[in-house]
Image (cartoon, rainbow, N blue to C red):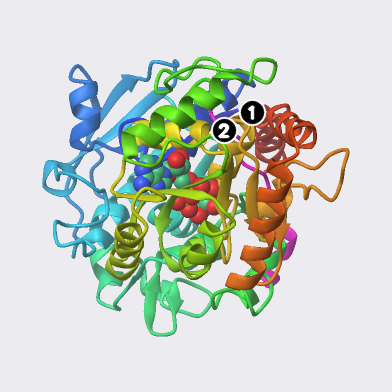
Amino acid sequence: MKVLFVISELAPWVKTGGLGEVGGALPAALRAHGVDARVLVPAYPALLEHFPGAEEIAQPRGLGGLFPIPTLRQALSPDGTPLLLLDYPHYFHRPGNPYLGPEGRDWLDNHLRFGLLSRVAAWLGSEASTLDWRPDIVHCNDWQTGLAASYLHYLPGQRAKSLFTLHNLAFQGLFDHASLFELGLPDEAWHIDGVEYYGYLSFLKGGLQHADAINTVSPSYAREIQTEAEGMGMAGLLRHRGERLCGILNGIDTRIWNPATDHHLYRSYSAHRLDGKATNKAELQTQLGLKQRGDIPLLGVVSRLTEQKGLDLLLEAAPQALELPAQLVVLGSGTPELQQAWTALARKHRGQCAVTIGFDEALAHRIEAAADIFVMPSRFEPCGLNQLYSLRYGTPPVVRATGGLADTVIDAADATHGNGFVFVPATADALLQALHRATTAWRHPKRWRQLQKNGMERDSSWEEAARQYADLYQRL
Ligand code: ADP
Ligand code: GLC
């Protein structure tokens, strides 16, 4: 089975969130499962720097629309996964975040940049390809690659089947009508059964409409998005395609997220030797200017600061949460309003609340290890990786019952299997009550140990997901 895995970010080189983590880990897990998975990703500066010898293997021509002739380069990732780097300097040699310019706004030519990625994926899966490796399946991820399924749908001749994995319904890749022509899509695609969406062209809709199969990254999210309340305007289409839609829970890269070997930590530890966790807490308190206290719990957050993640709820609950008492450490970046509000809160509660605005890989690992309780009050969560990291790091999470959070966190009310704390209404009150339950339980060492152990022993590796994806490819 040959699979072209198409994605717009790739950890550890280019990552804005969970999508990049999936790109960096799932293909290797698929290969371990006997699938010949190769990754197609834009040749961003960080990738070209890391793979300076990536040799040219093709120049896809005749792509239509306003598309240029890009260069495909080949490299081998350290885990043995072949990478196809889509090189077109004018589109991809831009610093920083793959989607946003220096002002924090989307690049104006994102439709062409990710249209090219999608179009080249379809080229590789079609008779036009000049490579001798031709995929059976083109596996697309999120809106940036959704049009690959549409191009494959409209291309003549023999072509690969397509799978569209939906990581987040909130990002829909909407562009104006003129882009239909620029992207070289046929006129017939401008239709309610095509890529047209309320007068816009939607990359996401293309993927949902034209892929031979669709999946999301947790079973609960797959159900939720078929309801009007959570379908973000796509519920009807998702229900229509319901038979082709399933949920496959993400895994985590257990080579990187392992408290026993994590080189970012002050001290390593494991389920059997948990004492190292206290050292991580004390050191992080010092690093971030928090009072050195072992007798009150430290709440941790690593997150995009957006509406999705419910950090406005935590902001509202924070003054009372600190009174429980507890300390709070937050790492994140996102909307200017939330960044300012969080910074202001930290200023007001110096020594008890520390907020770092930015993206900091090492600090993310240290927070997972140092915190006693992880907080993730998401309004919706397709899967969520941070709660999985926190489970593995012996940091029981407090989560809202939604999507992948509901599928991975078991409330402490279940004395045998509980590994965290779950609340239902998206309100500051409900969150505060759950935090109260968590900080109370933290004061009972024996009970707490059991919660930690249950989380740390959960199998969150990619193996099960890889098996399910391999089955899905086979069915296609
Ligand atoms: P999402 O992809 O919706 O943001 P996930 O929980 O799936 O949420 O994945 C988020 C990933 O991004 C995790 O690996 C997390 O550690 C990382 N991350 C998020 N914000 C930051 C940050 N400010 N600094 C470092 N890592 C971050
Ligand atoms: C998205 C989702 C997140 C998921 C990640 C990887 O960013 O918001 O819940 O874990 O994709 O699939």
The answer to which quarter of the image holds residue 349 is bottom left
| Residue 252 numbered mark, or none | 2
- In the depicted structure, whether residue 354 falls above or below residue 344: above
Q: Residue at x 30, y 23 (%)?
A: 74
Query: How many residues crowd mark 1 within 10 Å: few (<14), some (14–19), many (20+)?
Result: some
Q: Quadrant of ligand 1?
A: top left
* Label 1 secondary element: loop
* Label 2 secondary element: loop
- Amino acid type of the residue tagged 1 in the rendering: Ser
Labels 1 and 2 touching (C-beta < 8 A) = yes
- Amino acid type of the residue tagged 2 in the rendering: Ile
Rounded to the nearest angstrom, the CA distance separating label 1 from label 2 is: 5 Å
* x, y percent for residue 390: 58, 38
Q: Which residues are magenta?
A: 239-253
- Residue 244 visible in the shown view: no
| Residue 461 numbered mark, or none | 1
